[in-house]
Image (spheres, grey):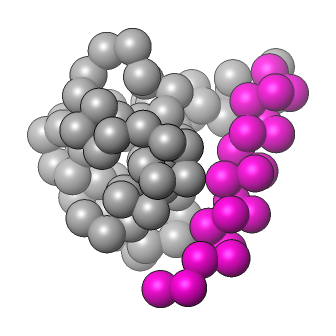
């Protein structure tokens, strides 16, 4: 999963750690949002990629992330920084 590897490199976290359920739910939600926005894959496919979760769980995680970013400006800035770094990647 090349896209996840780029993401994990940018946030300096192991890919297996991001895809594991638990403490890193925000990182996982960011990954799911980016995969949905830029990789032209369905939420069901994203769910399979990031831990064999249901498409509705992907949808809920993405929605919670958007709500969280509205309230947490540091998280919103982190997300924007990741977008910026990804846009500069040569793939």
* The stretch drawn in magenta includes residue 30: no
The image shows residue 52 at horizontal and vertical percentages of 13, 40
Quadrant in the picture for the N terminus: bottom left
Relative to 41, 51 lies left or right? left
Name the spot of residue 83 as percent of width and height, x first: 69, 60
> Left or right: 51 with respect to 83?
left
- Residue 75 on the magenta segment: yes
* Residue 65 placement, left or right of 13: right
Question: Residue visible at 43% across and 72% down?
Answer: 39
Position of 56 compared to 48: left or right? Answer: right
Give coordinates of residue 70: x percent, y percent.
81, 28
Residue at 70% across, 44% down: 79
Dominant secondary structure (helix, strand or loop) of the stretch shown in magenta: helix
Furthest toward the top, the residue is 23
Name the quadrant containing residue 89.
Answer: bottom right
Report if residue 69 is visible in the image: no
- Report the span colored magenta: 72-91
77 vs 26: above or below = below
Which residue shows up at 73% across the image and 39% down it? 78
Picture layout, residue 64 above or below residue 47: above
Question: Which quadrant would residue 25 be assigned to in this image?
Answer: top left
Judging depth in this view, the residue of 83 and 45 nearest the camera is 83
* Residue 85, visible in the rendered structure: yes
């Amino acid at each position: 999963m090349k896209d996840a590897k780029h993401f994990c490199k940018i946030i300096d976290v192991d890919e297996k750690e991001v895809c594991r359920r638990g403490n890193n739910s925000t990182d996982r939600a960011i990954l799911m949002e980016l995969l949905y926005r830029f990789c032209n894959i369905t939420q069901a496919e994203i769910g399979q990629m990031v831990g064999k979760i249901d498409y509705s769980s992907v949808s809920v995680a993405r929605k919670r992330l958007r709500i969280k970013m509205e309230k947490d400006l540091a998280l919103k800035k982190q997300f924007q920084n990741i977008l910026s770094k990804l846009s500069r990647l040569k793939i």
